[in-house]
Image: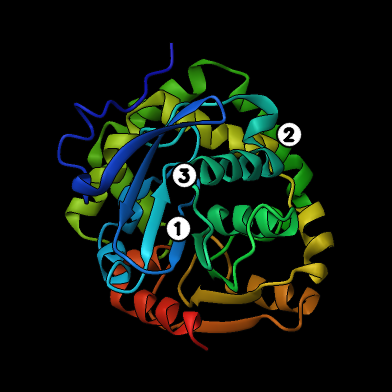
Amino acid sequence: MPQYPAWEREGRDWPNRHASRFVQAAGLRWHVQVMGQGPALLLLHGTAAATHSWRDLMPLLAEHFTVVAPDLPGHGFTQPVTGPRLSLPGMAASVGALLQVMQVKPTLVAGHSAGAAILLRMALDQRIAPDAIVSLNGALQPLGDQHAAFFTRTARLLVGLPFVPSLFAWRAADKAVAERLLTDTGSRIDAQGVDYYARLFRQSGHLAAALGMMANWDLVPLLRDLPRLVPRLLLVVGAKDRAVPPAQADRVRARLPSARIITLPGLGHLAHEEAPDQAAAIIIAEAAP
């Protein structure tokens, strides 16, 4: 049986715990953090992460915005979903329902990796209408590009084998494994940050949600629809990102010439965790271009 992070255990000293609340929406119990005052800013983390990803960035942004950051379905302390609801449109619909319940209409949104793709889908589906979208190392191209279909089929096979998430979780029980996985993204984060990831990676249910997203992820319709995006799009790219090659930003801009690119030298896929002050400055500036 899948095991999920427990708020009383894995969340005992969760970053910004004072800002946490639990909200019922779309048939799920969501873990959401809300902090600050001002225009609403929505943050969406990437696959296999959770709100801890914003631990140092969120307080900086809260000086200028009311920051809303949920754990995505099946991630962190939000209840899981299955099948189509793990797809890009499914995730977009679920987050949209959460915002409706919370009566949040963000004027600015920022997403890391897969979180950026969800925000774009939400904007294209008119579930949000921000002035701008900030993509932090956004995973906006099909995994493996020309081999995308193979990776998706493989992920579906893996997620259909109940022992696979448990096997991954068993391996990740060693904190050194989690650290190696994070380093492989091109980023180096502090020991406390590694520990938060390791806590989640030990839970087979959390990893099953990440695999489920991979199995149901299809970016082709998103790229097809991208030219009709209304909000401004800013692509923030870590020059050392080994998870999402920086060149992908150029391919996205080829489809949406109005998109802008900012490259952060020396930073990897978790650039916003490595240099939260730089990420904050970029996001704040985008609120008033």
Q: Which residue is mark 2?
A: 153
Say the numbered circle drawn on residue 226. Answer: none
Q: Earlier in the sequence, mark 3 or mark 2?
A: 3
Spatial CA distance of label 3 from label 2 is 36 Å
Q: Which residue is mark 3?
A: 102
* Residue 43 at least partly seen: yes
- How would you rate the neighbour count of disc 2 (Cα within 10 Å): few for under 14, some for 14-19, many for 20 or more? some
- How would you rate the neighbour count of disc 1 (Cα within 10 Å): few for under 14, some for 14-19, many for 20 or more? many
x and y percentages locating residue 132 in the rendered image: 59, 73
Q: Residue at x 60, y 73 (%)?
A: 131
Element under disc 2: helix
x and y percentages locating residue 289 in the rendered image: 52, 89
Q: Earlier in the sequence, mark 2 or mark 1?
A: 1
Spatial CA distance of label 1 from label 3 is 14 Å
Q: Tell me the kind of residue under disc 3.
A: Met
Q: Nearer the viewer, mark 1 or mark 3?
A: 3
